[in-house]
């Protein structure tokens, strides 16, 4: 499945009688509710393998962003708890999973792993329970703390188990649970990690023509991957606030909600893109709205960007109109593509959906192309807007839905999956 690159694979590990610490990306809870269990389901193969080979499972994942980046305070609440994930796994797999309870330090979250966890590990080894699920890793001070704090937490995590398995491709940041722990335990790539990396190769070595579609709410989070895609892809298409900033930079429009930082990035990108004539495909029809409160009658309208004068002021541009995907040059790009990578929601959700629907339907019309969807919002909106297509995509060999869109863009930017810090850590283990 995977060229090893000196990475050890879970199928090569001796798991019998071993306690296995598994880092997953089950970050699917919003305000205590699971809206899409895809990321959880994608890891079940790894969990089944560990169990079948006689291993004892300790799971861990981050959920949300409970840590205030400015103050460092950690907010422990049900909104970022793993309990909904535990409930889902217990119901789906008919197993017993317990979550340890640690002392909560005011504003600092959990200071570390406490000895109270030992009785749960004993129950695990005696088959009284089937798995232990640690609290949200970001509830621990050491997960994203200083170098000393992270190393201390990583060492504590390693003390719980005999083997470490990383199956959290989407969690690409260098934290204690994704990188640090690999220094202290024999470490292996889980089946999902292997599958995600194997599908990255279809982006690195695509069947051409290769079309990339990227949208987002901020230019700075995607700018480096956009530069790479402009060089590597045959065609690049933008959407969302990124596209709005691009239009302002290129055509002199003034659109509400575009920050000065995004404008600076967009101006540099427009200048850079001018050296790749014909690669960046513009979507001519955009939807302007007078308000962010919804798609209200009489408060939104469609514009053709080529008929607007330079300096024209627009209210919020909240979608690409479906008519854009009926243009002959756009149809040609998508219909002739052999590989399509999509990390894009074209409109301001949940009310402006026509651009995303038209995009996904046009992509599906090309029955021959390989379609690679980035995770997160891209996946959730596909499920919400086109549930039938989403179900088909899950089982179709022509589709692959990554569990982590940000991780894919980071891997594209680095031009190799070995540029991801958790993967480097597996190699060094």
Image (cartoon, grey):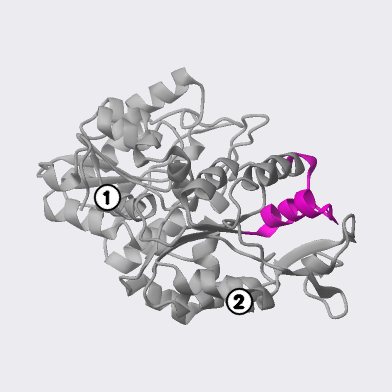
Q: Which residues are magenta?
A: 238-261
Q: Quick one: SS at disc 2?
A: helix
Image quadrant holding the C terminus, namely top left
Observer-nearest of 53 and 213? 213
Q: Give the number of the mark in front: 1 or 2.
A: 2
Residue 15 falls left or right of residue 185: left
Residue 64: x and y in percent read: 54, 48
Question: Which residue corresponds to mark 1?
Answer: 194
Residue 113: x and y in percent read: 38, 31
Question: Which residue corresponds to mark 2?
Answer: 328
At x 44% / y 32%, what residue is drawn? 175
The part of the image, by quadrant, that contains residue 403 is bottom left
Q: Is residue 270 visible?
A: yes
Q: Is residue 5 above or below residue 83?
A: above
Observer-nearest of 322 and 335? 335
The disc at residue 302 is: none
Observer-nearest of 354 and 310? 310
Q: Is residue 175 above or below residue 365?
A: above
- Density class for disc 1 (Cα within 10 Å; few <14, some 14-19, many ≥20) is many
Residue 330: x and y in percent read: 59, 71
Residue 324 falls left or right of residue 340: right
């Amino acid at each position: 499945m995977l060229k090893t690159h000196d990475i050890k694979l879970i199928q090569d590990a001796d798991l019998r009688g071993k306690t296995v610490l598994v880092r997953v990306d089950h970050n699917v809870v919003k305000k205590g509710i699971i809206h899409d269990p895809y990321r959880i389901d994608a890891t079940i193969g790894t969990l089944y393998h560990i169990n079948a080979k006689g291993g004892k499972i300790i799971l861990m994942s981050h959920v949300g962003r409970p840590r205030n980046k400015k103050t460092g305070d950690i907010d422990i609440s049900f909104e970022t708890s793993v309990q909904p994930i535990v409930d889902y796994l217990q119901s789906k797999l008919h197993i017993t999973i317990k979550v340890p309870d640690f002392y909560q330090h005011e504003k600092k979250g959990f200071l570390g792993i406490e000895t109270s966890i030992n009785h749960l590990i004993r129950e695990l080894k005696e088959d009284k329970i089937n798995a232990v699920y640690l609290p949200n890793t970001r509830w621990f001070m050491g997960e994203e703390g200083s170098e000393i704090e992270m190393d201390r937490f990583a060492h504590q995590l390693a003390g719980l188990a005999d083997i470490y398995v990383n199956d959290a491709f989407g969690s690409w940041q260098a934290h204690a649970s994704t990188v640090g722990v690999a220094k202290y335990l024999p470490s292996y790539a889980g089946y999902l990690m292997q599958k995600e990396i194997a599908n990255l190769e279809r982006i690195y070595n695509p069947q051409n023509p290769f079309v990339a579609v990227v949208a987002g709410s901020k230019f700075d989070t995607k700018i480096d991957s956009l530069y790479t895609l402009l060089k590597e892809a045959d065609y690049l298409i933008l959407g969302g606030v990124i596209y709005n900033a691009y239009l302002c930079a290129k055509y002199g429009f003034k659109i509400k909600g575009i920050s000065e930082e995004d404008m600076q990035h967009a101006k540099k990108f427009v200048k850079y893109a001018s050296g790749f004539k014909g690669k960046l495909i513009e979507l001519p029809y955009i939807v302007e709205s007078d308000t962010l409160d919804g798609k209200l009658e009489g408060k939104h309208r469609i514009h053709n960007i080529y008929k607007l004068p330079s300096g024209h002021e627009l209210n919020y541009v909240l979608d690409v109109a479906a008519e854009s995907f009926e243009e002959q040059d756009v149809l040609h790009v998508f219909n002739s593509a052999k590989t399509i990578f999509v990390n894009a929601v074209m409109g301001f959700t949940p009310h402006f959906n026509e651009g995303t629907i038209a995009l996904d339907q046009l992509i599906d019309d090309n029955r021959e192309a390989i379609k690679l969807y980035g995770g997160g919002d891209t996946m959730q909106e596909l499920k919400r807007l086109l549930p039938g297509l989403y179900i088909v995509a899950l089982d179709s060999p022509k589709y692959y839905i990554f569990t982590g869109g940000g991780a894919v863009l980071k891997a594209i930017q680095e031009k190799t999956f070995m540029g991801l810090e958790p993967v480097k850590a597996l190699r060094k283990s």
